[in-house]
Image: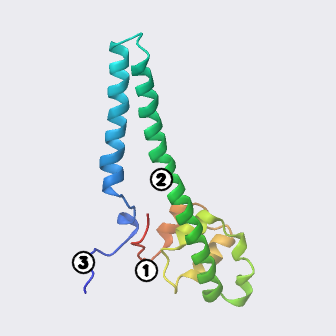
Amino acid sequence: MADDRPAQSYANHRRYYPLFHFVTIPILVLNVIARIVFAWKHWPARMPLWDVVVAAILVALAFTLRIMILTVQNRVIRLEERLRLMNLLPEEMRGRVGELSTSQLIAMRFCSDDEVPELARCILAGEVKGNDEIKRRVKNWRADWLRA
């Protein structure tokens, strides 16, 4: 079965989950606004204030769940990248894998196997610092379509 997806690159690597980003969050935010307006119009009634609290908690819950999911994903990526680096880096660099931060490892996951040693050397030497800079250095993009 052929993959109909376009090649992944720096320009299109960000992932949006439409049900979360474009449906759930906007509806929850609109609900908070509607509850605030209703509470304002019915001041000093107490029940509409409770509705505002519940609506705000639903937004907080949605973002908390998203953060938890991304945290688990980042831990898995960190483990995968450490294992990959142990297989791809020259012997003299393997001992320094622990010096790479989680965010650096996450940015490196898009790097092809052939580019890994040079990119890791640049990061460890301090030549490349930020995640965005790491991603921009990748020449042969390794797609990651399984992100949360």
Element class at badge 3: loop
Q: Assess whether mark 1 and mark 2 are in contact (beta carbons under 8 angstroms).
A: no
Question: 82 and 99: which one is in front?
Answer: 82
Element class at badge 1: loop
**Relative side of 94 to 46, left or right:** right
Residue at point 36%, 36% (across, down)? 29
Element class at badge 2: helix
Q: Nearer the viewer, mark 2 or mark 1?
A: 2
C-alpha separation, residue under disc 3 versus residue under disc 1: 19 Å
Question: 59 and 146: which one is in front?
Answer: 59
Near mark 3 (Cα within 10 A), the count class, few <14, some 14-19 or many ≥20, is: few
Q: Assess whether mark 3 and mark 2 are in contact (beta carbons under 8 angstroms).
A: no
Q: Quadrant of the C terminus?
A: bottom left
Near mark 1 (Cα within 10 A), the count class, few <14, some 14-19 or many ≥20, is: some
C-alpha separation, residue under disc 2 versus residue under disc 3: 27 Å
Residue at point 27%, 81% (across, down)? 3
User: Residue 46 appears at what percent x and percent y?
Assistant: 44, 16
Give the label on residue 66, or none: 2
Mark earlier in primary sequence (3, 1): 3
- From the image, tell me which residue sits under label 1: 140
**Picture quadrant of residue 95:** bottom right
What type is the residue that disc 3 sits on? Asp
**Picture quadrant of residue 120:** bottom right
116, above or below 54, in the image: below
Mark earlier in primary sequence (2, 1): 2
Question: 145 and 20: which one is in front?
Answer: 20
Residue at point 33%, 20% (across, down)? 38
142, above or below 53, in the image: below
- From the image, tell me which residue sits under label 3: 4
